[in-house]
Amino acid sequence: MKKRSVISMMLLFAAFIGVIVLFMQKQGAEHLVYDDEQQGLNKQIVIYFSHVVAENTPKGLAAQKFAELVEEKTNGRVKVEVFPNGSLYSDEQEIDALLRGDVQMIAPSVSKVTQLIPEWQVFDLPFIFETYSDVEKVFTGKTGKQLLSMLDKKGIKGLALWGNGFKQMMSNRRLLVDVRDFAGLKFRVMPSEVIERQFQLLGAKPIVVPFNHVYESLEKHEFDGQENTVSNIYSKGFYQFQPYLTISNHGYLGYVVMVNQTFWNHLPKEIQEKIMEAMQETTTWNLKQSKMQNESELALMKQNDRMHVYVLTEKEREKWKKKFTPLYEQFRREFGDKLLQQIENERKEAE
């Protein structure tokens, strides 16, 4: 009996202590001070930005600069978290991930977009651009805006076109100077009908390999050559396996910065405006940075005794252009001449 009384007293005491604690918590909560910054954190918008290249490439650096500008312009209201090197999604997965809403922003190569909108193949045509000025004028001009608007019907908001640089030819066999030098070689390509046909015209065998698998494939000697920008070749160490580099500037590697349309539509208008401000500033910076970086890293590779670097002459480039004429003829048959003429006009304005 005494034991039950003791237990009852202990339970009553515990209950009394519990009431006191709850009362004190309530009183404390009423007197806590929340500053505006802390309240703002609860409303912070987070954007996951996934891409597949290294952080020290033109796209990798631009993504980081964009993130910094967005945070600055929105006073921390929007935070862009960048996931480089395919750490979140590979280039095979990222567009589907964007459409599902699993990630809010990506920047795939223009070649990837040709699978959604065939007209984008125009940017994969060899020698469509001659200079970096051509690229800047077209990417930020009427043609760029027109192609970006085509993404709307796919549930995607196109924000901008970024650049990596002009593409060059690499091989582990020999320098590729004459169009006949490609015959019989296996070449890694991005998924693009135009690029595949480009190498078929050269007598080579194109093999589609995702970017995040290229290094491993090179180690295993699964192909004889590839086309890529100097910045990708240098940052990823591809030159260790393919020391023959031909500076051809035959194509341009561009990226489409895009955001999930539903996510974008739910953002407050003032936030959309700040993001676009940051994007425009970043795009201007990126197009200049990509030129500088490709030039400086080419100079570094030329100093490497193991590298064999050859720059095509204008006469040799003309032979390549002639070889690729059927690609332009086929594009005109499928899509007409309007886009090509528009790009030509914008290029002339850049001169």
Image: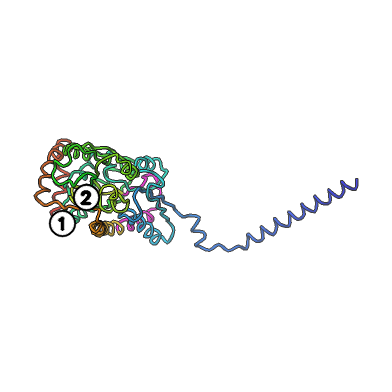
- For the residue marked with disc 1, what is the amino acid? Ala
Residue 186 spot, x, y in % from top left: 24, 38
Circle number at residue 245: 2
Residue 160 included in the magenta stretch of the image: no
Extreme right residue here? 1
The quadrant the C terminus occupies is: bottom left
Residue in front for this viewpoint, 85 or 234 = 234
The answer, for residue 285, to whether it is visible in the render is yes
Q: How is the image coloured?
A: rainbow
Callout 2 environment at 10 Å: few (<14), some (14 to 19), or many (20+)?
A: many
Number of marks in the rendered image: 2
Q: Residue at x 37, y 45 (%)?
A: 260
Extreme left residue here? 315
Looking at the rendering, the stretch of residues picked out in magenta corresponds to: 257-280
Q: CA distance from mark 2 to mark 1?
A: 29 Å
| Sequence order check, earlier mark of 2 and 1 | 2
Left or right, residue 108 beside residue 346: right
Q: Is residue 160 above or below residue 120?
A: below
Callout 1 environment at 10 Å: few (<14), some (14 to 19), or many (20+)?
A: some
Residue in front for this viewpoint, 25 or 315 = 315
Residue 268 included in the magenta stretch of the image: yes
User: In the rendered image, which residue does mark 1 sit on?
Assistant: 350
Q: Residue at x 62, y 63 (%)?
A: 31
Left or right, residue 324 beside residue 196: left
Circle number at residue 289: none
Callout in the foreground (2, 1): 2
Q: Residue at x 41, y 43 (%)?
A: 101
